[in-house]
Structure formats: structure tokens, C-alpha cells
Image (spheres, rainbow, N blue to C red):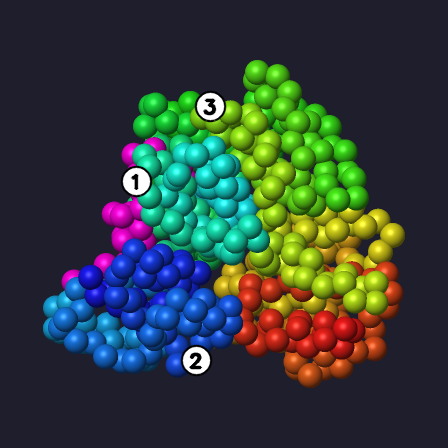
Amino acid sequence: MRIHILGIAGTMTAPLAVSLKKQGHQISGSDQDKIYPPISTVLKKAKIKINLYDITPDIDLCIIGSSYKSFETTKNEFIKIKKIKIPYLSATQYISQNLVKKESIVIAGSFGKTTISSLVSWIFLQAQKKPSYMFGGEPKNKYPAISFSTSDYSVIEGDESIHGLDKQAKFLSYKPKYVILTSADWEHKDCYSSASKNFNTFKKFIQMLPKDGLLVINNQSVSAQKLSDFSQAEVVTYNSPQSDYFIDKINIKNNFTTLIINTPTGLIKVDTQLIGQFNFENILAAVALCDSLKIKKNYIQKAVFSFRGVKRRLELVANHKNILFFDDFAQSTTRIKSTLLALKNHYPNKKIKVLYLAHASFNQYKNSLQGLDDAFKPADEIILGPLKYNPKINKKDRTTASDYKLILKSKLIYLPLKKQIIEYYKHNLMSNDILVYMSSGGFDNNRIFKSIINIYK
């Protein structure tokens, strides 16, 4: 089958393209004129040709990624696709029709989705369940982010965002039978105009669960607790002493941490190479689901210990001159706080310095800064890089550097130019420092961080 993918350079569409190529399909795609590593490298390695701008009637199917409206070339291609009547559907629809199985596991919430989804997939793989799965990250264990199989199980990272051709939240297309819900915070302000509309979408999602399904909720999330009232499936709780599953003891060692987990049937001990309370909670969520679905404990233990995490989730990428360089996806206050607390607890005698490039769409609204002072409390210094501005956001609602300065005070240094950032770090990192780069990605942003690291090689 000849398949063409618009917006091929996305976190969902790029691995999907590679997976479909491995299945024997002829794959091509389009995106912005220039794409960058690591996605450009992944597509080149798979020998997938992109940006040929050759929409012809012999294409059997077009898969439309969520970013296709962002570029003139892909918008024009979509017009041509419709004009010559090539069959098309969104990437979400394709996943729903071809990857989601009868025993559908969906991981949802405003944090932890990618790590939990990849860990649950890894546990099921080690338990020889051979699931279909999909998540939006690159696991350090080197298994693909998307895989199709003939198993009855599927594991999917369920996002509540609405983009591209999709008219509803992505997770509503994934026919959930088993769900992990970490939270239901109002994160996608570009998709939902109010917290109540965001909550109602999660409510609709939870109401889809069948009576013989399962809902695993984070007991420390008020929103998750409220949503559990709408589930006709069994509800299992985790992450508090009153929960079905909670961490009884934590023993931090140099190379790994031991977690003693209390379960309804007794204690289970797991060792992990990951650090930080938020990662321990992600592990706890995965253990709660897998144990509830009767995955043998020895498979769970072996999988958790061998799991190395996901790239860009508190990833130690370099150690030069006794300076540790961490790369992290953190943008929201919840994730920033959990990341910095993890570093403070694991490295209590080091100074934590943050390079914060606040480019996530929700960061462009003033009300997203609430709680930011508390989130950054463990940091000794914060460099705020250039801000993005969406012209569609009213000026009175739009975040400015002054708003950040008002909240973070003397800890914050605003450097709007890339060369200023590099020059600053050339003189202001010392032995025993930690530099954690917090960004939602982008080639230019990543290049700044790499330039800083190279200074100290």
C-alpha cells in the first residue's frame, strides 16, 4: 500500500511512518521545509522520502498529522488530496482503527503519561504479552515507540488535546477498557476555553469504561478522585497510605533505588534505576495496573529494574568537570516542581541551576504562572530564555518576562537572546553544579543546550 503522511515529523507520526515502512508499505511524507534531528535522522535511517510534494492519484491512503495546518506546503497538499479524492484520515483515527485492541489500556492525565505508558508496554513485553502500543517519547531501552501486533492487548498514551482533523480529544478514540488516570488538570488551554470543559472531556472519557474494565487513579489528585465517581468500572487507587497501592519504604542507593510497595495481596519489592519521587509514583501507577491485571510479580520486578526511562524525562546527558547536565521536558508547575525536588533529594549538596525555555502553548497565558514560585523553590538560579507569543492571545492575558520576574524575583535572570544565554553559562557554571534544561524541545533550543555542554567538555 502506498501511504503518504502530512505532518510526518511529529512525535506520533514519525514513529508511525517507520512502523508502517517495516510492515512493507511504501511511505512518503511532508512537513515543514527543514526538519531536524532526531526526527530527521530517524526518517532518513528508515529511507523514508519526505517533502517531494508529489500528490498523485496512485496514493492509496493519506494520514494527516495534527501539525498539517502549521505549514503552507502541507495545507496546500491537503487541498489537493481532497480535490483528487484520495482517501484520508487523521493519525488518531488510524491508530484507533489499526492499533487499539479489545483489551485496550489507556494512560491519561496531565503528567507522567509517557513514562507510565512506556513502562507498562515494557512490562507487558517482558511478560510475553506482545501488546500493540504507542507513546510519545523515545525509550532509552531502544524499543520502538509504536508497535502493531496480533495480541488482544494495546497500550496507548492518551492525550486530551484536540488538533488537526480531530474534533474531539484523542483519548476518546481509543476505546478504553483499562485506564490509569494521573490527574485531570486544565493544561491544554488552546483546546479548552475553561477548566469545566476540560473536566467534562475527562468525564466523558471515564464514562466510556465498561463494567468489566478498570480505573486506576492517583489518590493525590483531587480531579482524578472526582472523576472516579463517574466510572462504572472497578476503581483501584494508588499513591497515598489509604490507597490500594502505596510506597511503604524508599531506600536510595548509588546506582538504584529500592521501593517497597504495599499491594492488596502483600508487599512487592522493586528496584529501579530512575530517580525522583515523580518517577517512583509513575512506577507505582504501572505496578498497580499490571498487578491488578494479574501480571506475575517476577515479570514486573525484572521489567522495572531493567527499564531505563524515556529520553528528555530527567535524562542525565553529560557530566563534565563535575557539572551534571540534565535534559527535561518540564514546562508545567507540577512537572517543574517534581523534577527539581527529585534532583534536590538525590543531590542534596549540589547547586541546581535551570535553563527554562517556556515554549509550551499553555505557558503563553498569564494564569499558567500560578504556583511557579513554589515549583522553582528548589532551584538556586533560573535563566529564562526568549518567550513565544501567540498573536491570537489577548495582550492582557499574554505572559511577559515581567510576569516571571514578579513571581521569581532575584532568582530569575531574563536573557532573550540565544548568544546571551551561551555567553552567560560560559562564565557561570562551576564544579558541583547541576544545569537542568527545561524545554518542550525544538532544534534551536536543543542547540543552545548542546553549545553550553560543549563549552565544558
Characterize the local packing of mark 3: few (<14), some (14-19) or many (20 or more) Cα atoms within 10 angstroms. Answer: few
User: What amino acid does circle 1 point to?
Assistant: Thr
User: What amino acid does circle 2 point to?
Assistant: Lys
The reply to whether residue 104 is in sight is no
Q: Could you say where residue 82 lies in the image, as x and y percent from the top left?
A: 16, 70
Rendering quarter of residue 441: bottom right
Q: Which residues are magenta?
A: 87-106
Q: Report the residue marked by disc 3.
A: 294
Name, please, the residue furthest toward the top.
265
Relative to 405, 98 lies left or right: left
In the rendered structure, which disc, 3 or 1, sits on the residue that comes first in sequence?
A: 1
- 3 or 1: mark nearer the eye: 1
Residue 34 marker: 2
The answer to whether residue 445 is above or below residue 365 is below
Tags 3 and 1 in contact by the CB under 8 Å rule? no
Disc 3 is placed on an element classified as loop
User: What amino acid does circle 3 point to?
Assistant: Lys
Relative to 265, 55 lies left or right: left
Residue 150 marker: 1
Cα–Cα gap, marks 3 and 1: 20 Å
- Residue at 63 percent of width and 43 percent of height: 279
